[in-house]
Amino acid sequence: EESSVLSRFQQYLKINTAQPSPRYQEAADFLVSQGKALSLEFQSIELVAGKPLVLLKWEGTNPNLPSILLYSHTDVVPSEHSKWAHHPFSAHLDSNGNIYARGSQDMKCVGMQYLEAIRRLKAERFRPLRSLYLAFSPDEEIGGHDGAEKFARSEIFQGMNVGVVLDEGLASPEDHYRVFYAERSPWWMVIKAVGSPGHGSKLYDNSAMENLLKSIEIITRFRASQFDLVKTGFKAEGDVVSVNMVFLKAGTPSPTGFVMNLQPSEAEAGFDIRLPPTADPESLERRIAEEWAPSSRNMSFSFKQKARTCDKSGKPILTKTDPSNPWWALLENAVQKAGGKIGKPEVFPAATDSRYFRERGLPAIGFSPMANTPVLLHDHNEFLHKDEYLKGIKIYESIIEAYASLDHQGRDGGSRDEL
Ligand SMILES: CSCC[C@H](NC(C)=O)C(=O)O
Ligand SMILES: [Zn+2]
Ligand SMILES: [Zn+2]
């Protein structure tokens, strides 16, 4: 039994779904075959040609109740094969019990654990009251625009009458699981300085380089002030504004590199900024316009990505963790019942597809049952221990049983009351 459970996980891991050319059809065929083997209803939906989203359904005995969506993405990030101890698509199980593969944590584990939990529940003759859906979606790693974003806005999704979404979380090196009720919004900003060109030997004011450097110094000070709040334990990583410089572009190219005695007339820098849901986006935008890229210093700024932090009525987009959201307590209890521990609710520091469901007013909980595990998503040698994987199946069995049995409406918990 254990070896066939692990071998199904390995089979999924071996499908190379790395961006930028994921083998989506292969993954979809595999997932549909898993759905068929479990007698689930299945569809492969191409909201965008060549990017199938596999939707499986286990109909509840009361299909009028809002359904449960067990969500995962099928794509993975690229990897530098030569820097791994085992090939990232070999799904190698080493003598310590670790399974090495790109996607072993992020997040093929979760997708397969949902299926294995359903296999166990079916074997125990469990009958869900609510309908359960499993969605395996493309393109999360590149923003989810052709995946979750279109799906959450589709008629198909509307017809599913979803009441709650489970999506990915992060591994935890401690013995408790991490659980997420919100996420920071990515703002990818480019600032540009212009200035007079001049001889490399000349000292003068307002060169493009000088203007850009002043901005970088100011941004670096802001970064340090936010990081200090984390270092001193006043705030969690997801509760501060992070800003990291991700590129610098300046200089006059020459066949041998760059012209060394010419001060350029333009210079650019790119920043990955993340705003917690409680941040005031207008005040940050003012700070950018007045301090980070002021036109008075010949600076301008633009955004490559600028996700919303609030809904249309100005409320932060988050899932409630108080008793008004029955799904939250149900998850905590179900995990405990299966022998797991849950940490304090957190804001996910990066972006997940949950934002598209939360934007629609639905509660979405970020949870990947991986305790005692280093956080290796997007890293070399991503792995998951087989016992953590197997334990996670039992955890989902307990959660799915509790969720599918909730007999009242259970529509609360989103950041808005109604869709
Ligand atoms: C803007 S979509 C990019 C999504 C990606 N998610 C993760 C988890 O790395 C990120 O936060 O950068
Ligand atoms: Zn992921
Ligand atoms: Zn990822």
Image (spheres, helix red, strand yellow):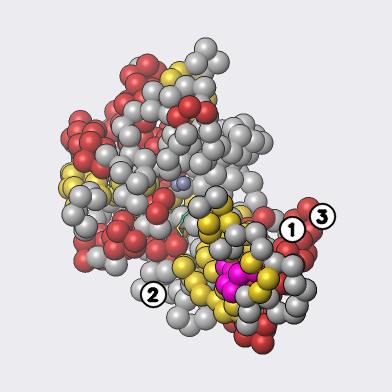
Q: Is residue 270 left or right of residue 161?
A: right
Q: Are marks 2 and 3 in contact (CB under 8 Å)?
A: no
Badge 3 element = loop
Chain part drawn in magenta: 263-268
2 vs 1, front mark? 1
Residue kind at label 2, given as amino acid type: Glu
The verdict on label 3 being within 8 Å of ligand 1 is no
Report x, y in % for residue 45: 19, 52
Determine whether the residue tagged by mark 2 lies in a helix, strand or loop: loop
**Residue at (78%, 53%) from the top-left corner?**
231
From the image, which quarter does the C terminus lie in? bottom left
Q: Which residue is mark 2?
A: 418
Residue 369 seen by the camera:
no
Q: Which residue is labeled 3 in the image?
A: 232
Residue sitting at the far right:
232
Q: Determine if residue 381 is in view.
A: yes
